Image (cartoon, rainbow, N blue to C red):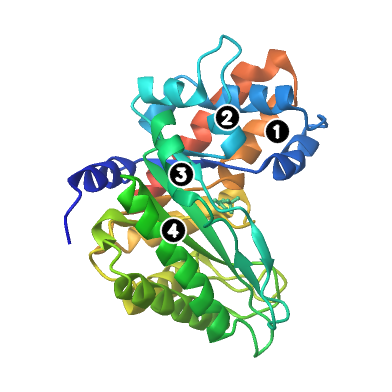
Amino acid sequence: MKKNTKLYETAAALLASGKGILAADESDATAAKRLEMVHLPNTPENRREWREIMLSAPGIEEYISGVIFYDSTIRDETSEGVPFADLLLARGIVPGIKVDLGVKDLHGFKGEVVTQGLDDLDKRFADYYEMGARFAKWRMVVTIDEDELPTDQSLKFNSLQLARYAQLAQDAGIVPIVEPEVIFEGDHSLAKAEMVTTRTLQILFQTLMEYKVDLSGLILKSSMVLAGSKHPEVSTPEQVAQATLRTFHMSVPHEVAGIVFLSGGQTPKRSTDNLNAIAKMGPQPWPITYSFSRAIEEPMLRAWGGKKENAEASQKALLENCKENSLASQGKL
Ligand code: 13P
Protein backbone atom coordinates (compact mmCIF):
# COMPACT_ATOMS: atom_id res chain seq x y z
CA MET A 1 0.00 0.00 0.00
CA LYS A 2 1.28 3.47 -0.89
CA LYS A 3 1.95 5.47 2.27
CA ASN A 4 0.46 8.93 2.45
CA THR A 5 2.79 10.85 4.74
CA LYS A 6 0.49 13.91 4.65
CA LEU A 7 -2.07 11.85 6.57
CA TYR A 8 0.49 11.07 9.25
CA GLU A 9 1.48 14.73 9.53
CA THR A 10 -2.15 15.76 9.98
CA ALA A 11 -2.74 13.03 12.57
CA ALA A 12 0.39 14.06 14.47
CA ALA A 13 -0.73 17.72 14.49
CA LEU A 14 -4.16 16.73 15.79
CA LEU A 15 -2.66 14.58 18.54
CA ALA A 16 0.04 17.03 19.68
CA SER A 17 0.71 16.72 23.40
CA GLY A 18 -1.51 18.92 25.58
CA LYS A 19 -4.01 19.60 22.80
CA GLY A 20 -7.38 18.12 21.86
CA ILE A 21 -10.15 18.43 19.30
CA LEU A 22 -13.27 20.55 19.64
CA ALA A 23 -16.31 18.78 18.19
CA ALA A 24 -18.36 21.77 16.98
CA ASP A 25 -20.21 19.56 14.53
CA GLU A 26 -23.77 19.66 15.77
CA SER A 27 -26.24 19.42 12.93
CA ASP A 28 -28.47 22.48 12.57
CA ALA A 29 -31.21 20.48 14.32
CA THR A 30 -29.00 19.49 17.29
CA ALA A 31 -27.74 23.08 17.61
CA ALA A 32 -31.27 23.90 18.82
CA LYS A 33 -30.59 21.95 22.04
CA ARG A 34 -27.45 23.99 22.78
CA LEU A 35 -29.12 27.32 22.02
CA GLU A 36 -32.10 26.33 24.16
CA MET A 37 -29.72 26.33 27.13
CA VAL A 38 -29.31 30.07 26.62
CA HIS A 39 -32.93 30.68 25.59
CA LEU A 40 -32.09 31.63 22.05
CA PRO A 41 -34.02 30.60 18.94
CA ASN A 42 -32.15 28.28 16.59
CA THR A 43 -31.47 30.79 13.80
CA PRO A 44 -28.46 30.80 11.43
CA GLU A 45 -27.36 34.12 12.99
CA ASN A 46 -27.42 32.77 16.56
CA ARG A 47 -25.54 29.64 15.48
CA ARG A 48 -22.97 31.82 13.73
CA GLU A 49 -22.49 34.10 16.73
CA TRP A 50 -22.04 31.15 19.10
CA ARG A 51 -19.45 29.49 16.84
CA GLU A 52 -17.64 32.76 16.23
CA ILE A 53 -17.22 33.31 19.98
CA MET A 54 -15.59 29.89 20.28
CA LEU A 55 -13.40 29.99 17.19
CA SER A 56 -12.08 33.50 17.77
CA ALA A 57 -11.29 32.99 21.47
CA PRO A 58 -7.77 34.39 21.97
CA GLY A 59 -5.24 31.65 22.74
CA ILE A 60 -7.51 28.71 21.96
CA GLU A 61 -4.82 27.29 19.64
CA GLU A 62 -2.76 26.49 22.73
CA TYR A 63 -5.27 23.78 23.69
CA ILE A 64 -7.22 22.98 20.52
CA SER A 65 -5.50 21.25 17.60
CA GLY A 66 -8.55 20.73 15.40
CA VAL A 67 -12.22 21.64 15.13
CA ILE A 68 -14.86 19.36 13.61
CA PHE A 69 -17.49 21.25 11.62
CA TYR A 70 -20.90 20.34 10.25
CA ASP A 71 -21.61 21.02 6.56
CA SER A 72 -23.33 24.36 7.17
CA THR A 73 -20.65 25.42 9.69
CA ILE A 74 -17.62 24.83 7.45
CA ARG A 75 -19.41 27.05 4.90
CA ASP A 76 -20.12 29.73 7.52
CA GLU A 77 -18.05 32.85 8.19
CA THR A 78 -17.41 35.49 10.86
CA SER A 79 -19.37 38.75 11.05
CA GLU A 80 -16.47 40.27 9.10
CA GLY A 81 -16.72 37.74 6.31
CA VAL A 82 -13.78 35.45 7.16
CA PRO A 83 -14.66 31.78 6.47
CA PHE A 84 -14.52 29.78 9.72
CA ALA A 85 -12.07 27.32 8.16
CA ASP A 86 -9.68 30.17 7.21
CA LEU A 87 -9.93 31.60 10.72
CA LEU A 88 -8.68 28.26 12.06
CA LEU A 89 -5.96 27.81 9.44
CA ALA A 90 -4.53 31.24 10.26
CA ARG A 91 -4.07 30.05 13.85
CA GLY A 92 -2.60 26.66 13.03
CA ILE A 93 -5.77 24.74 13.92
CA VAL A 94 -6.81 21.95 11.55
CA PRO A 95 -10.38 22.18 10.17
CA GLY A 96 -12.35 18.92 10.13
CA ILE A 97 -15.74 17.83 8.86
CA LYS A 98 -18.44 15.45 10.06
CA VAL A 99 -19.52 13.59 6.93
CA ASP A 100 -22.02 11.01 8.13
CA LEU A 101 -25.66 11.92 7.60
CA GLY A 102 -27.10 10.44 10.79
CA VAL A 103 -28.70 7.07 11.38
CA LYS A 104 -31.66 5.06 10.10
CA ASP A 105 -33.27 1.91 11.54
CA LEU A 106 -31.42 -1.26 10.59
CA HIS A 107 -33.84 -3.50 8.73
CA GLY A 108 -34.73 -6.60 10.77
CA PHE A 109 -32.84 -5.50 13.91
CA LYS A 110 -35.17 -3.82 16.39
CA GLY A 111 -33.51 -1.02 18.34
CA GLU A 112 -30.42 -0.91 16.12
CA VAL A 113 -29.41 1.63 13.52
CA VAL A 114 -27.05 2.04 10.59
CA THR A 115 -25.22 5.26 9.74
CA GLN A 116 -25.98 6.91 6.37
CA GLY A 117 -23.81 9.02 4.09
CA LEU A 118 -21.67 6.97 1.68
CA ASP A 119 -23.42 8.18 -1.50
CA ASP A 120 -21.23 10.69 -3.36
CA LEU A 121 -18.84 10.79 -0.42
CA ASP A 122 -15.83 10.96 -2.76
CA LYS A 123 -17.23 14.16 -4.31
CA ARG A 124 -18.10 15.62 -0.92
CA PHE A 125 -14.56 14.88 0.33
CA ALA A 126 -13.10 16.69 -2.69
CA ASP A 127 -15.25 19.77 -1.91
CA TYR A 128 -14.38 19.74 1.78
CA TYR A 129 -10.67 19.36 0.98
CA GLU A 130 -10.95 22.52 -1.16
CA MET A 131 -12.52 24.30 1.82
CA GLY A 132 -9.53 23.33 3.99
CA ALA A 133 -10.73 20.18 5.78
CA ARG A 134 -7.92 17.69 6.48
CA PHE A 135 -9.74 15.31 8.80
CA ALA A 136 -13.25 13.92 9.06
CA LYS A 137 -15.59 12.11 11.42
CA TRP A 138 -18.17 9.35 10.99
CA ARG A 139 -20.24 8.21 13.98
CA MET A 140 -21.64 4.74 14.49
CA VAL A 141 -24.17 4.26 17.29
CA VAL A 142 -24.01 1.24 19.60
CA THR A 143 -26.83 0.76 22.10
CA ILE A 144 -26.61 -1.63 25.04
CA ASP A 145 -29.91 -3.23 25.93
CA GLU A 146 -30.38 -6.21 28.25
CA ASP A 147 -28.59 -9.29 26.91
CA GLU A 148 -29.51 -8.82 23.28
CA LEU A 149 -28.00 -5.60 21.99
CA PRO A 150 -25.82 -4.88 20.21
CA THR A 151 -25.96 -7.76 17.74
CA ASP A 152 -22.79 -8.81 15.92
CA GLN A 153 -24.66 -8.28 12.64
CA SER A 154 -25.21 -4.63 13.47
CA LEU A 155 -21.59 -4.17 14.60
CA LYS A 156 -20.31 -5.79 11.40
CA PHE A 157 -22.63 -3.86 9.08
CA ASN A 158 -21.76 -0.53 10.67
CA SER A 159 -18.05 -1.39 10.66
CA LEU A 160 -18.27 -1.97 6.92
CA GLN A 161 -19.74 1.51 6.42
CA LEU A 162 -16.91 2.91 8.55
CA ALA A 163 -14.29 1.03 6.54
CA ARG A 164 -15.64 2.40 3.25
CA TYR A 165 -15.76 5.91 4.69
CA ALA A 166 -12.18 5.56 5.95
CA GLN A 167 -10.97 4.34 2.53
CA LEU A 168 -12.57 7.28 0.74
CA ALA A 169 -11.21 9.74 3.31
CA GLN A 170 -7.65 8.47 2.96
CA ASP A 171 -7.91 8.47 -0.85
CA ALA A 172 -8.89 12.15 -0.58
CA GLY A 173 -5.93 13.02 1.68
CA ILE A 174 -8.19 13.36 4.73
CA VAL A 175 -7.55 11.65 8.10
CA PRO A 176 -10.61 9.62 9.10
CA ILE A 177 -11.78 9.66 12.70
CA VAL A 178 -13.83 6.52 13.27
CA GLU A 179 -16.30 7.00 16.10
CA PRO A 180 -18.14 3.99 17.44
CA GLU A 181 -20.16 5.61 20.25
CA VAL A 182 -21.34 3.15 22.88
CA ILE A 183 -24.29 5.03 24.33
CA PHE A 184 -23.99 6.06 28.01
CA GLU A 185 -27.78 6.32 28.53
CA GLY A 186 -29.10 3.16 30.15
CA ASP A 187 -28.89 0.93 33.21
CA HIS A 188 -26.05 -1.35 32.09
CA SER A 189 -23.15 -2.21 34.41
CA LEU A 190 -19.52 -1.22 33.97
CA ALA A 191 -18.67 -4.85 33.15
CA LYS A 192 -21.30 -4.91 30.41
CA ALA A 193 -20.04 -1.64 28.95
CA GLU A 194 -16.52 -3.06 28.89
CA MET A 195 -17.64 -6.25 27.17
CA VAL A 196 -19.65 -4.40 24.52
CA THR A 197 -16.98 -1.77 23.83
CA THR A 198 -14.29 -4.44 23.50
CA ARG A 199 -16.43 -6.45 21.07
CA THR A 200 -17.31 -3.33 19.08
CA LEU A 201 -13.69 -2.25 18.72
CA GLN A 202 -12.50 -5.75 17.87
CA ILE A 203 -15.01 -6.08 15.04
CA LEU A 204 -14.32 -2.54 13.85
CA PHE A 205 -10.53 -2.94 13.66
CA GLN A 206 -10.76 -6.40 12.12
CA THR A 207 -12.94 -4.89 9.38
CA LEU A 208 -10.70 -1.86 8.87
CA MET A 209 -7.71 -4.17 8.45
CA GLU A 210 -9.55 -6.53 6.10
CA TYR A 211 -10.35 -3.56 3.87
CA LYS A 212 -6.77 -2.29 3.99
CA VAL A 213 -7.39 1.00 5.73
CA ASP A 214 -4.05 2.53 6.78
CA LEU A 215 -4.32 2.52 10.58
CA SER A 216 -1.32 4.86 10.95
CA GLY A 217 -3.40 7.54 9.22
CA LEU A 218 -6.56 7.00 11.27
CA ILE A 219 -7.80 8.18 14.69
CA LEU A 220 -10.23 6.33 16.94
CA LYS A 221 -12.86 8.42 18.72
CA SER A 222 -14.16 6.33 21.58
CA SER A 223 -16.57 6.48 24.44
CA MET A 224 -15.05 6.07 27.89
CA VAL A 225 -16.02 2.73 29.41
CA LEU A 226 -18.39 3.34 32.33
CA ALA A 227 -21.62 2.06 33.88
CA GLY A 228 -24.79 3.43 32.23
CA SER A 229 -26.35 6.73 33.31
CA LYS A 230 -29.21 4.91 35.11
CA HIS A 231 -27.10 2.20 36.76
CA PRO A 232 -27.17 2.43 40.58
CA GLU A 233 -23.36 2.54 40.77
CA VAL A 234 -21.46 5.52 39.43
CA SER A 235 -18.10 4.34 38.06
CA THR A 236 -15.18 6.12 39.73
CA PRO A 237 -12.44 7.73 37.59
CA GLU A 238 -10.07 4.89 38.55
CA GLN A 239 -12.62 2.27 37.50
CA VAL A 240 -13.27 4.11 34.24
CA ALA A 241 -9.55 4.41 33.54
CA GLN A 242 -8.85 0.75 34.19
CA ALA A 243 -11.83 -0.56 32.20
CA THR A 244 -11.21 1.83 29.29
CA LEU A 245 -7.52 1.00 28.99
CA ARG A 246 -8.15 -2.76 29.34
CA THR A 247 -10.63 -2.42 26.49
CA PHE A 248 -8.15 -0.58 24.26
CA HIS A 249 -5.37 -3.07 24.98
CA MET A 250 -7.70 -5.92 23.98
CA SER A 251 -8.81 -4.34 20.72
CA VAL A 252 -6.89 -1.37 19.31
CA PRO A 253 -3.84 -2.16 17.15
CA HIS A 254 -0.74 -0.19 18.11
CA GLU A 255 -0.39 1.31 14.61
CA VAL A 256 -3.52 3.44 15.14
CA ALA A 257 -2.37 7.08 15.17
CA GLY A 258 -4.20 7.96 18.36
CA ILE A 259 -7.36 7.83 20.43
CA VAL A 260 -9.64 10.74 21.34
CA PHE A 261 -12.67 10.71 23.62
CA LEU A 262 -16.21 11.94 23.24
CA SER A 263 -17.92 13.12 26.43
CA GLY A 264 -21.18 11.32 25.68
CA GLY A 265 -23.45 13.18 28.10
CA GLN A 266 -21.16 13.08 31.13
CA THR A 267 -20.84 16.44 32.90
CA PRO A 268 -17.84 18.54 31.88
CA LYS A 269 -16.18 17.89 35.26
CA ARG A 270 -16.69 14.16 35.10
CA SER A 271 -15.37 13.97 31.54
CA THR A 272 -12.25 15.91 32.57
CA ASP A 273 -11.68 13.89 35.77
CA ASN A 274 -12.02 10.60 33.90
CA LEU A 275 -9.61 11.77 31.20
CA ASN A 276 -7.12 12.75 33.88
CA ALA A 277 -7.35 9.30 35.53
CA ILE A 278 -6.82 7.63 32.14
CA ALA A 279 -3.78 9.80 31.35
CA LYS A 280 -2.27 9.12 34.77
CA MET A 281 -2.04 5.44 33.82
CA GLY A 282 0.10 6.28 30.79
CA PRO A 283 2.14 6.26 28.71
CA GLN A 284 0.18 4.03 26.31
CA PRO A 285 1.04 2.83 22.79
CA TRP A 286 -1.17 5.63 21.37
CA PRO A 287 -1.47 9.34 22.14
CA ILE A 288 -4.79 9.80 23.98
CA THR A 289 -6.69 13.08 24.30
CA TYR A 290 -10.13 14.75 24.21
CA SER A 291 -12.55 15.50 21.41
CA PHE A 292 -15.49 16.72 23.44
CA SER A 293 -18.48 18.63 22.23
CA ARG A 294 -20.90 19.15 25.14
CA ALA A 295 -18.18 18.94 27.82
CA ILE A 296 -16.32 21.81 26.14
CA GLU A 297 -19.29 23.87 25.00
CA GLU A 298 -21.60 23.84 28.01
CA PRO A 299 -19.54 26.10 30.32
CA MET A 300 -18.96 28.71 27.58
CA LEU A 301 -22.64 28.64 26.58
CA ARG A 302 -23.68 29.24 30.19
CA ALA A 303 -21.23 32.14 30.57
CA TRP A 304 -22.48 33.64 27.29
CA GLY A 305 -26.17 33.35 28.07
CA GLY A 306 -26.89 34.58 24.55
CA LYS A 307 -25.85 38.16 25.41
CA LYS A 308 -23.36 40.16 23.32
CA GLU A 309 -21.86 41.82 26.40
CA ASN A 310 -20.91 38.36 27.77
CA ALA A 311 -18.89 37.27 24.73
CA GLU A 312 -15.55 37.93 26.42
CA ALA A 313 -16.56 36.15 29.66
CA SER A 314 -17.70 33.22 27.53
CA GLN A 315 -14.33 33.03 25.77
CA LYS A 316 -12.65 33.11 29.17
CA ALA A 317 -14.80 30.21 30.37
CA LEU A 318 -13.94 28.31 27.19
CA LEU A 319 -10.22 28.86 27.69
CA GLU A 320 -10.36 27.78 31.34
CA ASN A 321 -12.22 24.62 30.42
CA CYS A 322 -9.83 23.82 27.57
CA LYS A 323 -6.85 24.38 29.87
CA GLU A 324 -8.29 21.91 32.40
CA ASN A 325 -8.79 19.34 29.66
CA SER A 326 -5.29 19.97 28.37
CA LEU A 327 -3.86 19.32 31.84
CA ALA A 328 -6.11 16.26 32.22
CA SER A 329 -4.89 14.83 28.91
CA GLN A 330 -1.42 14.89 30.43
CA GLY A 331 -2.56 13.47 33.78
CA LYS A 332 -1.57 16.73 35.48
CA LEU A 333 -4.79 17.69 37.23
P1 13P B 1 -20.00 14.80 23.02
O1 13P B 1 -18.65 15.12 23.58
O2 13P B 1 -21.04 15.85 23.35
O3 13P B 1 -20.44 13.41 23.32
O4 13P B 1 -19.90 14.88 21.45
C1 13P B 1 -18.82 14.31 20.81
C2 13P B 1 -19.19 13.89 19.46
O5 13P B 1 -18.47 14.15 18.54
C3 13P B 1 -20.43 13.12 19.28
O6 13P B 1 -20.50 12.60 18.00
In the current view of this chain or complex, which residue is farthest to the top? Answer: 80
Determine whether, in the image, residue 243 is placed left or right of residue 14: right
Determine whether, in the image, residue 28 is placed left or right of residue 294: right
User: Which labelled disc corresponds to residue 165?
Assistant: 4
Per the model, the C-alpha gap separating discs 2 and 4 is 35 Å
Query: Which badge, 3 or 2, is on the more N-terminal residue?
Result: 3
Disc 2 to disc 1: CB gap under 8 Å? yes
**Residue, x 28% and y 71% (percent of image)?**
253
Element on which disc 4 rests: helix
Per the model, the C-alpha gap separating discs 4 and 3 is 12 Å
Element on which disc 3 rests: helix
**Can you tell which of label 3 and label 1 is closer to the viewer?**
3
Q: Which residue is mark 2?
A: 317
Q: Which residue is mark 3?
A: 123
Residue 212's spot in the image, x, y percent? 28, 68
Query: Which badge, 2 or 4, is on the more N-terminal residue?
Result: 4
